[in-house]
Amino acid sequence: MVQVDDTALAVTDTGGPGIPVIYLNGSYASQRHWRRVTADLGPGYRHITFDERARGRSKLASDYSFEACVRDIDAVLAARGVDRPLLVGWSYGALLGVHWASRNPDRARGVVGVDGPYPVGWTEEAEHEEIRKVLRRMRLMLPLARRLGLAARFSGEEHVRVAIEAHLLHAAAGPLLEELAVPVRYVVASGEALGSRDDLQTEMRKTIEPILARNPNLRVSAKVTSNHGSVLRKDSPAVADVVRELAASTSAQDRRSR
């Protein structure tokens, strides 16, 4: 367990001399979601996974904000003695990855964003009320969702706050992505989530295209057929391949700079 602020985070570190890869989870997910990706990558990498506050085996906290999650990345890296990681994030974790990399451009090897981040989100109060309604309807399912690693152990109201903050941060991510000086490789899912409007996620994914044209550090390395929720389970080999691609390119760059 890694102590940070008033909580403790459950961390798994395979150790070894390989390139350190830190995996950043979706909003309410846990480190268990990365098992297939780390297995596909194999023992040649140093895999560091952890559960965010009140997710998985980590302890409760008084602060579940995005900034607290950024601090947690620093805390885990410091505790494990890692200075220059490659960050791999899914969904909310991908947003965390690019924010951390933008603040630490000399330390980040790069970011692999698994179906994110995309510079779009719900910013209107009516849209936020829709989030509240959806999570209210789901409140009786939260205990089951927690056991499946799909919800946190904090309250339904806190789930709403995390979701709304994430939408606002995604919507504001355009300038950060345009100015990012570290390599980012996207794994883009093409499937639609069950129950979503047919073209909703397709429109969301298109928002990155103008930024890709303006910032050569950002690139789509893989497009897969799974949807947002199943990408780590169904297309883990593709995610692993993109991690290998980015690790190889950053290692080659390191050799050239010596």
Image (spheres, rainbow, N blue to C red):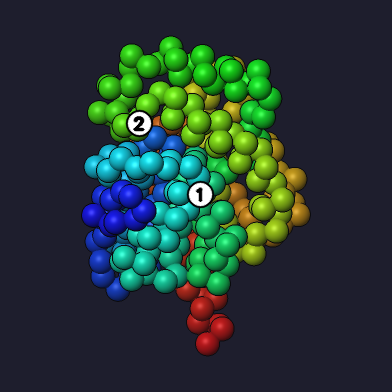
Neighbor class of circle 2 (other Cα within 10 Å; few <14, some 14-19, many 20+) is some
Q: Residue at x 33, y 17 (%)?
A: 141
Q: Is residue 253 visible?
A: yes
Amino acid type, mark 1: Glu
The residue at which mark 2 appears reads as: 154
Q: Quadrant of the N terminus?
A: bottom left
Looking at the rendered structure, the secondary structure element under dot 2 is: loop
The x, y position of residue 253, in whole percent, is 55, 76
The residue at which mark 1 appears reads as: 67
Q: Residue at x 34, y 55 (%)?
A: 4
Apparent side of residue 126 relative to residue 25 in the rendered image (left or right)? right
Q: How many badges with numbers are in the image?
A: 2
| Numbered mark located on residue 148 in the image | none
Q: Residue at x 33, y 14 (%)?
A: 140
Amino acid type, mark 2: Phe
The x, y position of residue 221, in whole percent, is 56, 51
The x, y position of residue 150, in whole percent, is 35, 30
Neighbor class of circle 1 (other Cα within 10 Å; few <14, some 14-19, many 20+) is few
Decide: is 140 above or below 64.
Answer: above
Decide: is 42 above or below 63.
Answer: below
Decide: is 251 above or below 35.
Answer: below
Apparent side of residue 151 relative to residue 245 in the rendered image (left or right)? left
Give the mark nearest the N terminus, 1 or 2: 1
